[in-house]
Amino acid sequence: MFRLLIIPLLLGLGEPVKVVTEPAEETSTYEVRYLYGGLNAKVAKATFTLTQDEFEGQDAYKAEIGIKVQPIFRLFMHSRYKVEDYFTRPGMNPLYYCTSSNKGSAWCRYSEDEIVFWRQYGKMPEPAIFHHPNDGISMELVTLLYYVRTHDFKEGEPYEVRPLMGGQPREATLTMEGIETEKYPGHSAQILHLEMLERGILENGSGKDVWIWIDSDERRTPLGLQVSLGKRGTMVCHILE
């Protein structure tokens, strides 16, 4: 149930406006929790790092994510996840994404004209491979989270995005709904609403509404994320400071 959600916990229609500033190197730690009625359970701890690096001989940003899942939730999820993500420097445009767990792996390569998505998990006898045009708004969820940090959004205007779910693009919109000043004391955060128009981000189709809080300062650090699971509760992710 939670397998597709855990890594994202970690967007008039058209392409978002590019922000001029480039991200700084950073390390952030997050806690993921599951809320259901009176239950408030810790699911996982995640560490995000962003550094300057190279990818196939060109300057790049490298994002790394490590996630360790609590023992009780390993009944539904893999015990550990690792993600590496490369972006152009400057520009923060996606180049390459890969993720691995104790059950399999997936990668996504972005060229100027094409996106190639490869995955093989569990008992799949052969990998699944997908080819899509690179339209500038199709990308898997972790890359999308980093990509939106380098864009400015006009309040109330939805932008078209296409998250790659298992290698297939899904129609969605991303809207900046306002500024939050109380949820994260000392921070003024933009509230971004990712609305999945076809199905949600979980394997059972739930999780159609995702809210992301991003710091309004020049670093634009993600502060938190929340996904409604309908009658099954809510998944939340908060930065640890």
Image (tube, rainbow, N blue to C red):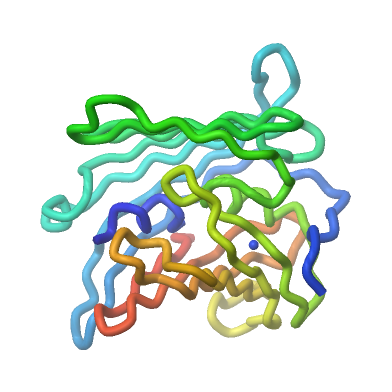
Marker count (numbered): 0
Residues 38 and 210: in front is 210
Where residue 235 appears, as percent x and y from the top left, is 35, 70
Q: Quadrant of residue 216?
A: bottom right
**Looking at the image, residue 229 lies above or below residue 200:** below
Q: Residue furthest right?
A: 20
Of the 4 image quadrants, the one containing the N terminus is bottom left
**Looking at the image, residue 230 lies above or below residue 98:** below
Where residue 50 appears, as percent x and y from the top left, is 59, 38
Q: Residue at x 59, y 66 (%)?
A: 172
Residues 233 and 199: in front is 199
Q: Quadrant of residue 23?
A: top right
**Looking at the image, residue 72 lies above or below residue 199:** above
Residues 15 and 29: in front is 15
69 on left or right of 188 = left
Viewer can see residue 84? no
163 on left or right of 38 = right
Q: Residue furthest bottom?
A: 37
Viewer can see residue 175? yes
42 on left or right of 150 = left
Where residue 151 appears, as percent x and y from the top left, is 77, 57
Q: Residue at x 40, y 70 (%)?
A: 207
